[in-house]
Amino acid sequence: MDSLAAEFDEWYSTMRASSAGDDIHQRHLGLPPRLLSTSLLTWDGIAEVVEALRLEPGGLLLDLACGRGGYGLEIASRTGARLIGVDFASSAIDQARALASRFASVDAEFRLGDLAATTLPAGSVDALVCVDAIQFKATADSFAEMHRVLRPGGRIALTTWEAVDHGDERVPARIRAVDTSAGLTAAGFAEVVVRERPQWRAAERSMWEEASALDPGSDPTLRSLREEGLRVLPTFDLTRRVLATATASGPIGQPVTSR
């Protein structure tokens, strides 16, 4: 396990002991209690992702960097899709498997894997969602892996943050490295569209303002949330919230087809 995976494994393990952070996320993002979030996609944002993916009942959805699994399970529940979730943190996978019991109608599987190495066969999934995670490995290998596992004509939806000015060193290097349009295009995706989502951003600001004013006491989850809020807010307006969508192209020389 690499150092980042170990860090996230510990982070997810800490969440088992306290639901206080979940309460704050759910209230600001408009999420129901059954949807345990470790990301910042709002309830309305989920609807936008569902629309972008164009999933049909019985199709296979990959939730890449799935965390505790809530977003993928919710999308699969709404669309009638089958779900496979992949994450590099074993504690996240354990919690996702447990959470799946709240979504009894969803045929779901969760396994260990990486943004750039899912372990899935080529062309094996109909749609792919990656919520607030590409910034941890915004490399050509990650975008290429997403294209590899999607069938020709399959849809992808990524939510993340990008720097308003990629040269602004006040923005964390991890965010400055994100260029979803360039990454998806270089990997061979077609119909690439990147849209700003200021309404999602407003919900985030509200959440971080509350988090930064917390008295966390001895709760490690609240302490982590407060520290992140204090870190994020000073450069909040230097980044933009985006939803990136695209279609996997067919083999070279062949058109993209949808089924």
Image (cartoon, rainbow, N blue to C red):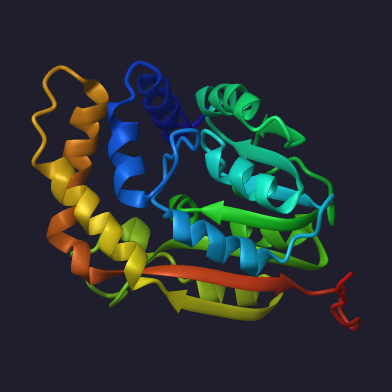
In this rendering, is residue 216 above or below 137?
above
- Look at the image and tell me in which quarter the C terminus lies: bottom right
Q: Residue at x 20, y 63 (%)?
A: 236
In the rendered image, residue 219, in percent from the top left (x then y), is placed at: 20, 20
Q: Is residue 175 left or right of residue 144?
A: left
Q: In which quarter of the image is residue 98?
A: top right
Q: Quadrant of residue 90?
A: top right
Q: Residue at x 56, y 34 (%)?
A: 88
Q: In this view, does 143 lie to the left or right of 22?
A: right
- Inspect this view and state whether residue 169 appears: no
In the rendered image, residue 71, in percent from the top left (x then y), is placed at: 55, 45
In the rendered image, residue 187, in percent from the top left (x then y), is placed at: 67, 70
Q: State the residue in front, 172 or 248.
A: 248
- Inspect this view and state whether residue 130 appears: yes
Q: Which residue is drawn at 50% across and 77% down?
A: 194
Q: State the residue in front, 154 or 24.
A: 24
In this rendering, is residue 220 above or below 245?
above
Q: State the residue in front, 33 or 157.
A: 33
